Amino acid sequence: MQNDEANVREQIDSVARVLEARFGAVREIEPYQTWGRTVVVAGSVGDDRRPVVLKATAELDVLAEAATLRLVREAGVPAPRVLEAGEETALPGGRWIVMERADGLRLAHVAEQDLDSACEVCRPV
């Protein structure tokens, strides 16, 4: 267990260094999820303490995820603004995306019946 905690701390420290190099001082950073070679963290960066989320992963689709978020946002769909995406060997998995942290609930905290009712509203008649 202690080895797992040390590994997570090492991943978080790597994320903090990359965020600081790109966005300025990292004010806060906390892990959301970590699994295998993937880490998702929330933090505040820069003098304005801009809230961001960084996902670093070995998955190839993280760069496609960034492109998709940009496209849906341009189409008027509420989505977090992607600040940067790329490849960095210092991060777990090497591929990453940084986006503004969006207001709202995490999907994991939304009851299934709420999702069902939301889908009913979106279905074409």
Image: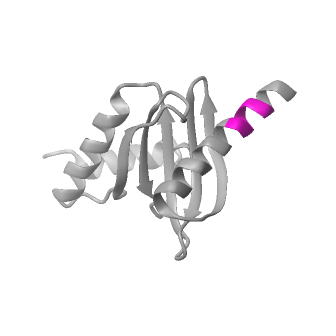
Which residue lies at the image location 56% right of the left edge and 71% below the top edge? 49
Residue 8 lies in magenta, yes or no? yes
What range is drawn magenta here?
6-10
Relative to the observer, which residue lies in front, 93 or 36? 93
Residue 39 lies in magenta, yes or no? no
Q: Is residue 30 left or right of residue 51?
A: right
Image vertical order of residue 107 relative to residue 23, above or below: above
Pinpoint residue 77: horizontal percent, then vertical percent. Answer: 24, 57
Which residue lies at the image location 44% right of the left edge and 61% below the top edge? 102
Pinpoint residue 123: horizontal percent, then vertical percent. Answer: 21, 45
Image vertical order of residue 48 relative to residue 9, above or below: below
In which image quadrant can residue 34 be found?
top right
Pinpoint residue 65: horizontal percent, then vertical percent. Answer: 32, 38
Which residue lies at the image location 55% right of the left edge and 75% below the top edge? 47
Instruction: Decide if residue 24 is in sight here.
Output: yes
Pinpoint residue 9: horizontal percent, then vertical percent. Answer: 73, 39
Image vertical order of residue 117 relative to residue 49, above or below: above
Image vertical order of residue 49 relative to residue 122, above or below: below
Which residue lies at the image location 70% right of the left edge and 36% below the top edge? 10
Q: Is residue 120 left or right of residue 38?
A: left
Q: Is residue 89 left or right of residue 11?
A: left
The residue furthest left is 125
The majority secondary structure of the magenta stretch comes to helix
Instruction: Decide if residue 105 is in sight here.
Output: no
Color style of the picture: one colour
